[in-house]
Image (cartoon, rainbow, N blue to C red):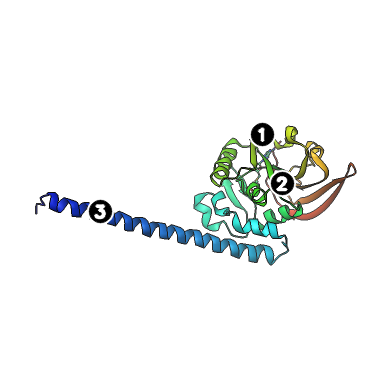
Amino acid sequence: MKIKLNRNTFIPIVRLSILLLFVLFLSSSGKFNRVIQDFEKLRKQMVQEQLKNRDIKSKIVLDAMENVPRHLFVPKELQHLAYYDSPLPIGLDQTISQPYIVAFMTECLAPKKGMKILEIGTGSGYQAAILAYIGCEVYTIELIPELADRAEKILNELKFNNIHLRCGNGYEGWHEEAPFDAIIVTAAPEKMPEKLMEQLSENGKMIVPVGRVNSIQSLKLITKSGGRTRERDLLSVRFVPMVK
Ligand code: SAH
């Protein structure tokens, strides 16, 4: 059959195509909204079951964990696992920490709006986003350029303007910006990194997992006061190594 296109048939076809495109758009954006709502639901559930039902009490930490979209910081193919009670691979042999560990370490620092915090090991950028959501001024250092670039991209997309990211060796700290009110180290050095201790302000707190790779490390809380440091062992943990 031959269809002859003249003005009388052409205009209805164009109209119908526009209508079809519009319906397609609506249905796909509806699906998109549903997926977003599912992630919100999973996030609320994660906060209740993995954080509140354990021992995380800080309202601002719980609030940040409930609002920062963790699934955007993990590889696409693992997004459905983003709110599980476990760490996840982020490529290049690195991991994003388990939600509970992120919340626990954040709570230990007693973060407040305006606090200047140094993070060693940007990784996915998720921990930096949690601190930035609270309103801290975050300085974060990542050794692997590819991870630094990826984290920068997502943090920019989420419009965080209080995160300063640098690609470099975390053992050196960030001399020009020191001292810091708090330091969070999210890779494990074998020994306490001296330069980081020096860059901690008076009354500052540092949280750091110390120990060898492939063995149990100790998550330590360091406090500095009167020029002296105090060290407390909080938890046994397993982090990727802080590379020399
Ligand atoms: N905080 C991250 C998880 C960190 S995984 C998050 O929220 O996703 C540990 C990270 O530390 C890895 O990305 C690793 O590349 C980085 N790292 C290891 N040694 C380092 C060093 N010496 N300096 C800076 N970053 C380092």
Amino acid type at image mark 2: Gly
Q: Is mark 1 within 8 Å of ligand 1?
A: yes
Few, some or many C-alpha atoms within 10 Å of disc 2 (few <14, some 14-19, many ≥20)? some
Circles 1 and 2: CB atoms closer than 8 Å = no
Q: Of residues 152 and 87, which is closer to you in this image?
A: 152
Locate the N terminus and report the quarter of the image it occupies: bottom left
Residue wearing tag 3: 17
Q: In the image, which is nearer the foreground, mark 1 or mark 3?
A: 3
Tell which quarter ligand 1 is in.
top right
Amino acid type at image mark 3: Ser
What is the spatial separation of the Cα atoms under label 1 and label 2, in whole angstroms?
24 Å
The kind of secondary structure element at disc 2 is loop
In the image, is residue 53 above or below residue 99?
A: below
Q: In the image, which is nearer the foreground, mark 3 or mark 2?
A: 2
Residue 108 in the image: state x and y as whole percent.
76, 54
**Which badge, 1 or 2, comes first in the chain's sequence?**
2
Locate the C terminus and report the quarter of the image it occupies: top right
Residue wearing tag 1: 168
Residue 18 in the image: state x and y as whole percent.
27, 53
What is the spatial separation of the Cα atoms under label 1 and label 3, in whole angstroms?
53 Å
**Which badge, 1 or 3, comes first in the chain's sequence?**
3
Amino acid type at image mark 1: Gly
What is the spatial separation of the Cα atoms under label 3 and label 2, in whole angstroms?
53 Å
Q: Identify the disc placed on residue 114.
A: 2
